[in-house]
Amino acid sequence: MFTLENIRLNKIVVSSTVIATALLISACSTTTRSVDGAVKYEVKDGKYTSYHVNTQKVVGKYNYGRTPTKTEIAAWDKDVMPDGTGLPEYDVKQGKVVLDDDGKPKKAEGSVEWGAELYDEQCAMCHGEFGTGGKGYPPLSAGTASTSSLKNQLLNPADENPGVEPPVKVIGTYWPYASTLFWYIQDSMPFPHPKSLSNSETYALVAYLLMENGVKIDGVDLEDDFVLDKEKFLKIKMPNADGFYPNVDTPENPKKGVENIKTFLSDPKNYGTGTRCMNDCIKGDVPVLRIKNELNDFNPPASTERSWKEVGAKEVSQEQKNYETYCAACHANDAIGAPVVGDKDAWEEVVAQGMDAVYANGLNGINAMPPKGGSDLSDEEFKKVVDFMINSSK
């Protein structure tokens, strides 16, 4: 079965564009009439139907680069697979091996208690206390590892099933593999400064989040003194591990469901064929379809503004562009804890420290903020961004 868990990134590198193109070519080459419009036309007068195409002959050869070295692949290939491939045994932080008191590589491991401390420092500002969700950020825990609510996906609790909760999709109820949790935290978190956690810190955060989700490891409840390492990680069985992919086996063909589906889909006559129709395709009354369960609980609410930019609108300064690129993610969201641009009182308190201190904190980093906000701006460019935020908050 070709699924995410058996793809090794250093062996299979596929472009979504290539896949889409291959599917299009396949569809075009196997049929000339299709209800979905997958019809192949000839290029005529430099156009493919209504679209212009480049009819020039290709000059020379394309250069696709070179084959990466093993070292380059090893530096890039940091994913952790469901079978444990990629899980670290030793502690490494920001590319450097952590040594113990004897000068030997330190074992990578972390306790639930340590993970709770790290979560409060690095994660709670976005994901809320105990992982219950923050303003604009997804919840990570519902305090349970039950998958029972997932079958309510298409139900309407208000009309048909009073008291039935909507599907709860958090780590403990929905995620099939804990390896995704480890890999995602280490590769992308914390949000303000990703890739800053050591292997041991990542183990600790994973242990804490599994505890908050009520997940057991080898039948053991995760107490504060529980220490997670590679050996114990391999014993994790997520509650929804067997429910994420559909079971396509049949009593007549046990363990051959995947082959049956491949055989069916390999024959285009089984789907997507018919007489091409461009207008007046539906005869008789047209059924009226209405959305029964609307997704309208977005926070913040989804914008319905569709107007064009005003002609002659004021040009945005480079300082504002840099702010929006490097700083707005934290300084435009009061859930993060950083002073929000426009909050006069908050910035007056910051400026009261003196501009030398304000610049120094920004350039060197403070609390959860990395140096220069994680940007590659020069010192002078960064100071101009600080000035922009202060002046915009007066």
Image (tube, helix red, strand yellow):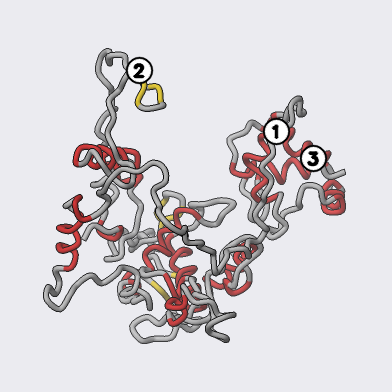
Q: Which residue is mark 3?
A: 356
* Residue 198 on image: x %, y %: 46, 58
- Residue 52 sits above or below residue 171 on the image: above
Judged left or right of residue 73, residue 189 is right
**Picture quadrant of residue 244:** bottom left
Contact, mark 2 vs mark 3 (Cβ under 8 Å): no
Contact, mark 2 vs mark 1 (Cβ under 8 Å): no
Frontmost of labels 2 and 3 is 2
Using the image, tell me which numbered label, if any, was put on residue 46.
Answer: 2
Foreground residue among 132 and 306? 306
Q: CA distance from mark 2 to mark 1?
A: 34 Å
Q: Which residue is mark 1?
A: 309
* Residue 18 on image: x %, y %: 30, 38
Q: Earlier in the sequence, mark 2 or mark 3?
A: 2
Q: Residues within 10 Å of mark 1 (few under 14, many from 20)?
A: few
Using the image, tell me which numbered label, if any, was put on residue 291.
Answer: none
Residue most extreme to the left? 252
Residue 48 is at least partly visible in this image: yes
